[in-house]
Amino acid sequence: MTMTMLRTLLLAGLFTLATVARGQPVPAPTAPQGELNEQVYQVPVSESVMRGGARALILVTVYRPPGNGPFPLVVISHDSPRTVEERRRMGRAAFEEQARAFVSRGFAVAVPTRRGYGRSEGEWAETYKDCKNPDYRFAGMETARDILATISALSTEPFIDATKVLLVGVAAGGFGSLAAATQPIPGLAGTINFAGGRGAVSDYSICELPKLAEAFGVFGAESRAPSFWLYAENDRSFTPAVAKQLFSSYVRAGGRGDLLIVPLHGQDGHAYFYTGMKAWLPLVDEFLASINFRPATAR
């Protein structure tokens, strides 16, 4: 099988997730808890075609406002720690503080803990393989597989407005969100990319930056929604110069978006999404207004 054929099969399999799970029961979500109506879903994800299409159940934390909705859906995707031990120590991704901000604006929020992270099943699938010859597109599309499975599972819930979907991601999650935005997601309104990228093996060191820019270009050529990119002036993983190179590759290929380099943040601006919420919330609100992403009651 050629690499082109393999990639074709990979892409074709992204939206056959329900057929993989057919005949295999999925546990019911936990009951809503607390003021954010927090629930934990177990969502089936098809493994890579290289692993025979087996199924893994990933944990997805879901929050929503009071009432029946339906509410527009925001999917927040986490980063990727560099070691197996760090990835497994994640437990269950929650982003409660960030989710609270979106819920207060009338949105439902889903936070998938992807395969190979925390307590989710499956092997870590997002490898870009060899640092000297990385396959970043493959890595991004594997992240996208978990994002797409999450949207597919939740789109049938009566409290979800599947005509309004927003992707938000940080670091590897930002990169994977841009990858997911190349797929035909019904209702996709836009993508917010916080410090997105892959291959940062240490501060100021990226495996084959031209290859990473090339992958961003592929995603830009196939993108289906506008995007908003935020990188901090003192990001040690993806500096402003790197961010501008990646963004340029994306928009030259046809992607739509705006890049904002925000001021210095803490000791390492790569943590901007985690600790800079007061600064980025007004910026996100402006983007949401520009794409008319709001709950029905606010129209």
Image (spheres, helix red, strand yellow):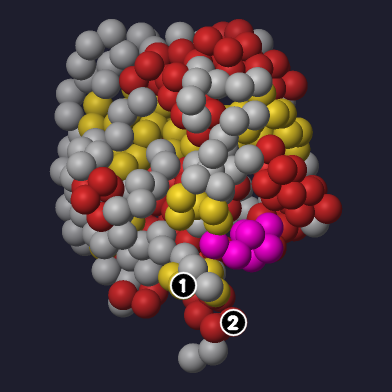
Residue drawn at the location 37% of the way across and 34% of the way down: 111
Quadrant of image for the C terminus: top right
In the displayed image of the protein, which residue is found farthest to the bottom? 1
Q: Identify the magenta region.
A: 207-213
Q: Quadrant of residue 189?
A: top right
Secondary structure state at the residue bearing disc 1: strand
51 relative to 10 in the view: left or right: left
How far across and down, in percent of the image, does residue 124 sit?
31, 59
User: Any magenta on residue 211?
Assistant: yes
Lateral position of residue 182 relative to residue 244, left or right? left
Tag 2 near tag 1, CB within 8 Å: no
**SS at mark 2 in the image:** helix
Q: Residue at x 75, y 38 (%)?
A: 257
Please tell me which residue is depicted at 50% across the width and 30% down the height of the picture.
268
Residue type at mark 2? Thr
Q: Amino acid at mark 1?
A: Asp
Q: Which residue is mark 1?
A: 130
User: Is residue 255 at all visible to an observer of this figure?
Assistant: no
Kindly tell me whether residue 136 is visible in this rendering: yes
- For the point 55% across and 74% down, the residue is 133
Q: CA distance from mark 2 to mark 1?
A: 18 Å
**Mark 2 neighbour class, 10 Å CA radius: few under 14, some 14 to 19, many 20 or more:** few
Q: Nearest the camera: 11 or 157?
A: 11
User: In front: mark 2 or mark 1?
Assistant: 1
Q: Which residue is mark 2?
A: 4
